[in-house]
Amino acid sequence: MTDTPDLDPTPAPAQDQGLVRTVDVGPFGIYFTNVNKAMGLRAHSHTGYVTVVYNTVGRHGYPSFADTNAALEAWIHELTRAVFKDATNEDIADRLFAHLDGYVDPVWEPWGGEYSLRAIHLDVIGVHDALGHDNSTTRYTVARTTGGQS
């Protein structure tokens, strides 16, 4: 029996190498209604998707499993259920980021991990309508450029 050379099982963290490691979770399907007073638009609804991006701070980051992702999706839906009054799509992306920033569901805790919210992507799916929307998808991103909550 020959010995296999021991490959370093714990390489230096990516941050020590000037790299950023992230875990992108989603996309989670959403449905929301907003009144966009800034653009003079009456209440209207959209379907879309939210992708959540976490920085991996330690050896492993956000624990992406069926139960952890279901909890994350439920938390997103807590915000998107109500009508967004006087809100542009950019405002909704800001509110999603604030809603998720620092959030940790109890179901995540047994898995451990070290992570912090880096960004959210809100993909709004358009349809041709009387307001002048088209049928493209528009991405709104809110991203932290440095630091973040743990």
Image (tube, grey):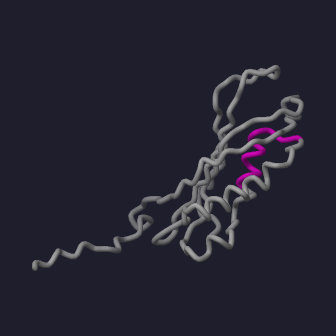
Q: Is residue 13 magenta?
A: no
**Residue 131: image location, x then y, percent:** 81, 23
* Rendered position, 15 above or below 31: below
Residue occupying the far front of the picture:
66
Looking at the image, which is closer to me, 18 or 57?
57
- Residue at 69 percent of width and 66 percent of height: 102
- How many badges with numbers are in the image? 0
Placement of the C terminus among the 4 image quadrants? bottom right
* Rendered position, 137 above or below 105: above
* Rendered position, 6 above or below 71: below
**Residue 11: image location, x then y, percent:** 34, 71
Q: Main secondary structure of the magenta part?
A: helix
Q: Is residue 91 magenta?
A: yes
- Residue at 47 percent of width and 60 percent of height: 21
Q: Left or right of 79: which side holds 62?
A: left
- Residue at 73 percent of width and 21 percent of height: 128
**Residue 38: image location, x then y, percent:** 86, 34
- Residue at 57 percent of width and 59 percent of height: 54
Magenta-tinted stretch: 86-97
**Residue 135: image location, x then y, percent:** 67, 24
Q: Left or right of 142: which side holds 5?
A: left
* Rendered position, 117 above or below 35: below
